[in-house]
Image: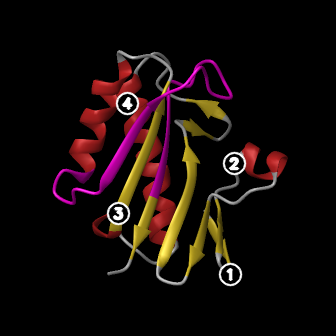
Amino acid sequence: MESTGPRVFSGGVWEEKYGYARAVVVGERVIVSGCTATIDGEVRHIGDAYRQGLTAIDIALDAVEIGGLTREDVVMVRYYVVEQRHFDHVGRAIYEVFGHVRPACTGVRVAGLVDPRMLVEIEIEALRA
């Protein structure tokens, strides 16, 4: 990942194709775009919502750190799953990473994501207190 002023880019294929940044730094806030378990253009952990959730969180936290904040500064997590049964798996991943931080959190079931192998997408917002 790299930072260009207030924008953070991961080099992901959709950032360039769809014209967005992985994250945007606004004052003391880092807003991270939705992250999936896609690394170097390949979806990882096919069929495993828990591991996809952990990978998406890692990608999002990398952007938070490049933006100058840490996991302790995370105030909001939003996650989108494509199957009802994935809520608990992704929730467990969120708890493992943020259980001591306790950010606000919203989980939503959606009809699908960009690639049918993707089971979860996660957005994170961090704010320096």
Of the pair 2 and 117, the residue shown nearer to us: 117
Residue type at numbered disc 2: Gly
Q: Which mark is residue 51?
A: 4
Q: Residues within 10 Å of mark 3 (few under 14, many from 20)?
A: some
Q: Residues within 10 Å of mark 2 (few under 14, many from 20)?
A: some
Above/below status of 92 relative to 82: below
Q: Residue at x 29, y 34 (%)?
A: 91
Q: Do the residues labelled 3 and 4 touch (CB within 8 Å)?
A: no
Could you tell which of marks 3 and 4 lies nearer the N-terminus?
4
Where is residue 7? Give x, y as percent: 67, 71
Residue type at numbered disc 3: Val
Where is residue 119? Give x, y as percent: 50, 24
Q: What element carries label 4?
A: helix
Look at mark 2 in the image and give the residue it sits on.
Answer: 12
Q: Which quarter of the figure has residue 32?
A: bottom right
Q: What element carries label 3?
A: strand
Residue type at numbered disc 4: Arg
Separation of residues labelled 3 and 1 (CA atoms): 22 Å
Is 19 a magenta residue?
A: no
Separation of residues labelled 1 and 4 (CA atoms): 32 Å
Look at mark 1 in the image and give the residue it sits on.
Answer: 5
Q: Which mark is residue 75?
A: 3
